[in-house]
């Protein structure tokens, strides 16, 4: 348990340090207009799986406040929030807070997949009105 606390504390310190060092977000030219204006999107796919119609699961949302470099939304069951920055052209979230409501296992598994993807540095690509956030643990499609 003590190692888990140390790991969590170290992760929080490193996340905060990274966010302090990067300064204003620096996005690639193709996604800069969309991200700098702020976003309020619904996630339509998680790791290639469509989330519409999954019983008991509300499609996650991602709200990016470019002025404050804050992210918030719903993760399917719970609400989350925190900070974000652009690091080497990728979207990197700081330590997130989250409510702790429960749901049936299949719904919680989908939420955990969403949060796992959000916990990695995310390459951002734009196509039409959609954004794709791609990381080491999968991709999210936003509309």
Image (spheres, rainbow, N blue to C red):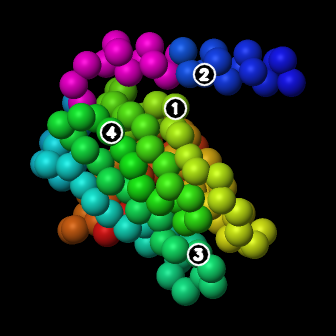
The C terminus: image quadrant: bottom left
Pointer 2: residues within 10 angstroms few (<14), some, or many (20+)?
A: some
Judge whether residue 22 is colored magenta: yes
Identify the residue at image location x=47%, y=65%.
60
How much space separates mark 2 and mark 1, taking CA atoms? 8 Å
Question: Which residue is identified by label 3?
Answer: 57
Badge 1 element:
loop
Pointer 3: residues within 10 angstroms few (<14), some, or many (20+)?
A: some
How much space separates mark 1 and mark 4, taking CA atoms? 11 Å
- Taking depth in this image into account, of 129 and 112 the one nearest to the observer is 112
Tell me, yes or no, if residue 44 can be seen here: yes
Percent position (x, y) of residue 50? 53, 77
- Taking depth in this image into account, of 102 and 112 the one nearest to the observer is 102
Tell me, yes or no, if residue 137 can be seen here: no
Could you tell which of marks 2 and 1 lies nearer the N-terminus? 2
Pointer 1: residues within 10 angstroms few (<14), some, or many (20+)?
A: some
Q: Are marks 2 and 1 in contact (CB under 8 Å)?
A: yes
Percent position (x, y) of residue 27? 23, 37
Is the residue 94 above or below the residue 42 in the image?
A: above
Q: Nearer the viewer, mark 4 or mark 2?
A: 4
Question: Which residue is identified by label 4?
Answer: 70
Badge 3 element:
loop
How much space separates mark 2 and mark 3, taking CA atoms? 29 Å
Q: In the rendered structure, which segment of residues is drawn in magenta?
A: 14-25
Question: Which residue is identified by label 2?
Answer: 11
């Amino acid at each position: 348990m003590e190692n888990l606390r140390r790991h969590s504390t170290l992760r929080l310190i490193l996340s905060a340090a990274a966010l302090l060092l990067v300064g204003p977000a620096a996005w690639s030219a193709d996604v800069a207009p969309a991200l700098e204006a702020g976003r309020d999107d619904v996630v339509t796919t998680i790791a290639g799986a469509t989330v519409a119609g999954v019983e008991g699961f509300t499609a996650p949302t991602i709200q990016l406040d470019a002025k404050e470099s804050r992210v918030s939304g719903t993760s399917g069951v719970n609400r989350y929030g925190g900070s974000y920055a652009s690091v080497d052209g990728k979207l990197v979230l700081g330590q997130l807070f989250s409510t702790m409501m429960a749901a049936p296992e299949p719904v919680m598994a989908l939420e955990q997949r969403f949060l796992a993807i959000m916990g990695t540095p995310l390459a951002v690509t734009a196509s039409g009105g959609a954004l794709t956030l791609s990381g080491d643990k999968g991709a999210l499609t936003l509309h």
